[in-house]
Image: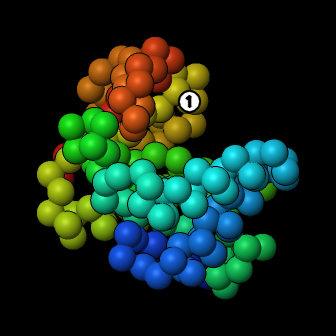
Amino acid sequence: MSMDSIIFEVVTNRDSITKKMENADDAARLLSCGSKVAYQQNLEFLEKWHRDEIPGKKYTISLYEDQVTSDNIAGVLRIWQSPYCDDKWLLEGIEVRYDKRRKGYGKKLVQKALEILKNLSVAEVYLNVNNTNNSSRALVMSLGFKLCSEGCKNSFGHELKTSNHYVYQF
């Protein structure tokens, strides 16, 4: 698949509820890897996310191949100004469909997120990477993120001992 045929869909707090729920369904399918239980759990979370039951400014970026349909979703990423983390901007929930990995889609999603945040005049953005996820660590380091702490808090403010905290400064 050519990088020319990718389409980004960015959903924000301001979009219609219909658009938000369609995005939630697509993202939940991607995140569930075929598990009906995981699909339902992801869908419930994403519906809360899109209905603003989870506070903070939020963006969801979905990457599609060729056209915006649930069959063509290849990756998803969320941007969140989390009130649970001193209103820091966070990248989270970065996921690329298993059969679409190693094609540069994760990198494209992060670059799109950084573009959005730069346009919002955000000074820095954070993300957490599991210590054993060598591919993700290499990706974020290649994009200019710097390790700022070993161990961290997740986007809801809970301690994570198995992840490290990275920062990107504009």
Foreground of the two, 52 or 76: 52
Q: Residue at x 36, y 29 (%)?
A: 157
The tally of labels here is 1
**Left or right relative to 30: residue 86:** left
Q: Position of residue 69 (x, y in %)?
A: 71, 80
Above or below, 135 relative to 40:
above
Q: Position of residue 9 (x, y in %)?
A: 51, 76
Mark 1 neighbour density, 10 Å: few (under 14) some (14–19) many (20 or more): few
**As shown in the figure, which amino acid type bears the numbered disc 1?**
Asn
Residue 82, can we see it?
yes
Q: Position of residue 30 (x, y in %)?
A: 71, 58
Residue 156, located in which quarter of the rendered image? top left
Foreground of the two, 101 or 14: 14
| Colour style of the rendered protein structure | rainbow
Foreground of the two, 147 or 12: 12
Residue 98, can we see it?
no
**Helix, strand, or loop for circle 1?**
helix
The single residue placed furthest to the bottom in the displayed view is 67
| The N terminus - image quarter | bottom right
For label 1, the residue is 134
Q: Residue at x 42, y 51 (%)?
A: 54
Q: Residue at x 53, y 49 (%)?
A: 94
**Left or right relative to 73: residue 159:** left
Residue 27, located in which quarter of the rendered image? bottom right
Q: Position of residue 78 (x, y in %)?
A: 46, 55
**Left or right relative to 103: residue 169:** left
